[in-house]
Image (tube, rainbow, N blue to C red):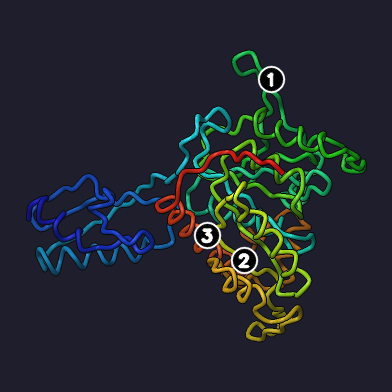
Amino acid sequence: MTEADILKALGNVQEPDLGKDLVTLNMVKDIAINGNEVSFTIVLTTPACPMKDMMRTASENAVKILVNKEAKVQVNFTANTTTNRKDNRQVLAGVKNIIAVVSGKGGVGKSTIAANLALALSEGGAKVGLMDADIYGPSVPIMFGVRGERPLMKDVNGKGMIVPLEKYGIRLISIGLLVDEKNAVVWRGPMASSAIRQFITDVEWGELDYLIIDMPPGTGDIQLTVMQTIPVTGVVIVSTPQTVALADAKKAIAMFGQAQINVPIIGLVENMAYFTPAELPDNKYYLFGKEGGKRLADEYDLPFLGQIPLVQSIREGGDNGVPAMVGDDAVSKQALRDFVSAAVRNIAIRNANLTATKPVEVTV
């Protein structure tokens, strides 16, 4: 066996999402051959890549079928998270992908989706931060069990920077960590927008594969501020199957599709898709309607990222500061993993096929 033989064989193994072979994509490194033993490393587009096992099996088969049926193949993996940032990196310089989680209305579980998206990405080995941009209704301190804690300050090149809290491996910042939770944040739009800009420019986020932004509901000041300040890789739309929620989700879709904003939509996830009682795990009750989110995704030709059930443990975990992805309920964790796998794949496809992200010049 030679290195050329191995590369020729792996030239027949497709990266499932990007539609090209591993060699063309320059994903094969460190080929080592010793008799019948061969090892090499595949460089994934993200540590949280859901197609890892498929690529391992396909690579092993390619070498054995096309090179040497007696070969003992060792496939290693590393990751270099893809990014499509080509801006000047004056803000969030160490962040590769910025994902906004949005909804047209409140109460659809957007913060739950954002929190568990961050945790599932981290579970896959990615470095992740979570910014709670919902100034008037911050949820992150409760959901991560850090109520009452305060972030520290540090001096960085003569500038005071906020050090985000860290819980379950996720770097966190929220207005709820800076003000007493018993006090309402009674601010006009410009003050809220100023706070968001401070979360972006005055927090030491460091090196991150993904920064997840839990956006407030609606299509207002804070959404515009985020889009104007940073190059958002894409947005995840959250809705329930209910007609009222779908009507508002359409407004969010329309906002990000406007010519002057034009931020890619990674996909739509249907939350509270059905109710499954713990004592009847095989039963599904469609309390808010059936597959409304899937139909909406089809209508707008958006990737459908999956359905998250209405499970008591997801609600309890969020209230108790132990989100579902670090809890014990296998059903909810699997549904969330499936959703995040679809999201990760669509982020990689977006980075490979669409133009570079940049802050938008909003004129509305």
Looking at the image, which is closer to me, 339 or 189?
189
Task: Name above or below for residue 80 compared with residue 143.
Answer: above
Position of residue 282 in the picture relative to residue 66 (left or right): right
Q: Are marks 2 and 3 in contact (CB under 8 Å)?
A: yes
Q: Which residue is mark 3?
A: 343
- The residue at the point 68 percent across, 82 percent down is 290
Rendered location of residue 303, percent (x, y): 53, 66
Element under disc 2:
strand
CA distance separating discs 1 and 2 = 38 Å
- Dot 3 alpha-carbon crowd within 10 angstroms: few under 14, some 14 to 19, many 20 or more: many
**Seen in the image, is 31 located left or right of residue 284?**
left
Between label 1 and label 2, give the one nearer the viewer. Answer: 2
Which quarter of the rendered picture does the N terminus lie within?
A: bottom left
Q: Which kind of residue does numbered mark 1 sit on? A: Gly
Disc 2 or 3, which lies upstream in sequence?
2
Q: Which residue is mark 2?
A: 269
Instruction: Estimate how packed mark 1 is, as few (under 14), some (14 to 19) or many (20 or more) residues with alpha carbons within 10 Å.
Output: few
If you read the primary sequence from the N terminus, does the residue marked by circle 3 or circle 1 appear first? 1
Residue 133 in the image, given as x and y percentages of width and height: 73, 44
Q: Mark 2 to mark 3: distance in Å?
A: 9 Å
Outermost top residue: 158
Q: Position of residue 342 (x, y in %)?
A: 50, 64
> What's the amino acid at mark 3?
Ala
* Residue drawn at 46 percent across, 59 percent down: 345
Report, in whole angstroms, how far the alpha carbon at label 3 lies from the one at label 1: 35 Å
From the image, tell me which residue sits under label 1: 160
Asked whether, in this view, residue 298 is left or right of residue 76, the answer is right
In primary-sequence order, the first of circles 1 and 2 is 1
